[in-house]
Image (cartoon, rainbow, N blue to C red):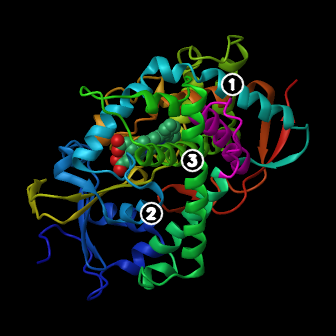
Amino acid sequence: MPLDIPGPRGLPLVGSLAAFARDPLAFCMSLREEYGDLAYFRVGGHDVVLVNDADLVGHVLKQKPEAMHKDAIYELMRPLLGNGLVTAEDETWRRHRALAAPSFAKRHVDSYAATMAECGTAYLAELEDGETRDLHDDMMDMTQEIALRTLFGGDLGLDVSGVGPAIATAMEAFTYNAHGPGRLIPDFIPTRTRRRAAEGIAALDALIYKAIEGRRALGLGDDLLSRLIAATDDEGRGFDDVQLRDEAVTLFLAGHETTALALTHALLLLHVNPEALTWVLEEVDADAGPLDATALRRLPRVEAAVKEAMRLQPPAWVVGREAMTDLELGGYHVPRGTQLLVSQWVIHRDERYFPEPLVYRPQRWVDGSTEALPKLAYLPFGAGPRICIGNHFAMLEAVIGMAAILREVTLEPLGPVPPKSVPSITLRPVEPSPVRVRRRT
Ligand code: HEM
């Protein structure tokens, strides 16, 4: 039975699959323009509702986890992520979240600031005046190094350099199955991409189990893996090795590309908006303080530059849920099994919330104009019980990284800003993002 919510009729059987697959961002924007706060469409066999109003978003994302599971797309991540926090549901998720949460307490995350600053400094040491770099590649390398060092610690004597490539191979298979030709090929057929992904995952597993073993043998430190190994519930039970593997892969994957995207876009957008750049550099140049956890408090303009970049180019452009029970939404009946999409891309560009929504203006985050926003008009980290566990980690890393870079260099973007991106799980550039480096000192 089609839902009563207005939306495009689409074609028999496939619904709006072609329009959605061709350009999901434009498709979702057009739905909001045409149908408003709620729009219903069909993709393949799924009923989908796009939710475009901040209050209704709260109604979806703040439900109990048992009432809203992740949507169908996350199943495709399971071969890689297992039952880690991003993919786990119900009791497993609840237990894992409770066990992992203390490791992300502010004081623990703040202790990683030194590693973040060291990786920023190491990156800057590579840069030469006048050279051209691919900024997103550089930011991926930097955040990957930070993720590896904070996750595994530096003292294992273990070569974890294979983790990144193994995960990248597995992610190729995800994109292929979710958005590419793999959509049309039954799961049980072992195509070349799927075989390579399976090999990548096997290599990754071997590496991570070795890291867990190494960490237990060496003694626990203050890295995230050690904290997860030490975590116990009220009955003294903790994560077993398979669960530790799933959480380690999940944290690595969920943490580094998203933050690299935030940094890439913030740096590019700043450097094509001279007024905003001058405004931010004023603050950076007046600050000689250490790049530690106090940087977040001392550098509100840098933070605003990152927040504004995540508004316009949200690293996670959509979060999806599947209703596990019938519900009422905006006066409509939404039956169990409906897929509900909340798109940061769409909501962050709504002029009811952000005047001149397409203009990059970091000042809006400190001049009071965003103070009266409905709470969920801005949600780069999601909301409700499944909100990003790494949000403080990410903001600290992004502000320290930005400040380290802006102290030393300015960048001249040589390609389009923002770079052409495709929305997969994240909104990632598909072309290089070349910049010419100018040393400031
Ligand atoms: C700018 C950087 C980041 C962005 C934009 C981001 C965004 C998000 C979003 C939107 C969600 C919610 C997904 C949903 O509700 O379906 C999420 C969940 C998650 N994020 Fe992040 N994230 C970032 C950085 C990080 C970092 C640094 C870590 C870890 C170190 C991390 C770990 C996680 C985990 C484990 C979850 C699943 C939480 C759960 O369901 O309990 N993220 N992230």
Mark in the foreground, 3 or 2: 3
Which residue was labeled with disc 2? 79
Report if the CB atoms under discs 3 and 2 are less than 8 Å apart. no
Ligand 1's quadrant is top left
Question: Is 301 drawn above or below residue 270 in the view shown?
Answer: above
Report if the CB atoms under discs 1 and 3 are less than 8 Å apart. no
Name the side, left or right, on which 328 lies relative to 187.
left
The spot of residue 66 in percent (x, y) is 18, 49
Which residue was labeled with disc 3? 208
As for residue 387 lying within the magenta part, the answer is no
Mark in the foreground, 2 or 1: 2
The spot of residue 147 in percent (x, y) is 60, 38
Q: CA distance from mark 2 to mark 1?
A: 34 Å
- Residue beneath the point at 34% across and 32% down: 99
Is any part of residue 25 visible from this angle? yes
Specify which label sits upstream in the sequence, 1 or 3.
Answer: 1
Amino acid type, mark 2: Pro
Q: Which residues are magenta?
A: 136-162
Is any part of residue 353 visible from this angle? no
Report if the CB atoms under discs 2 and 1 are less than 8 Å apart. no
Q: CA distance from mark 3 to mark 2?
A: 15 Å
Amino acid type, mark 1: Ala
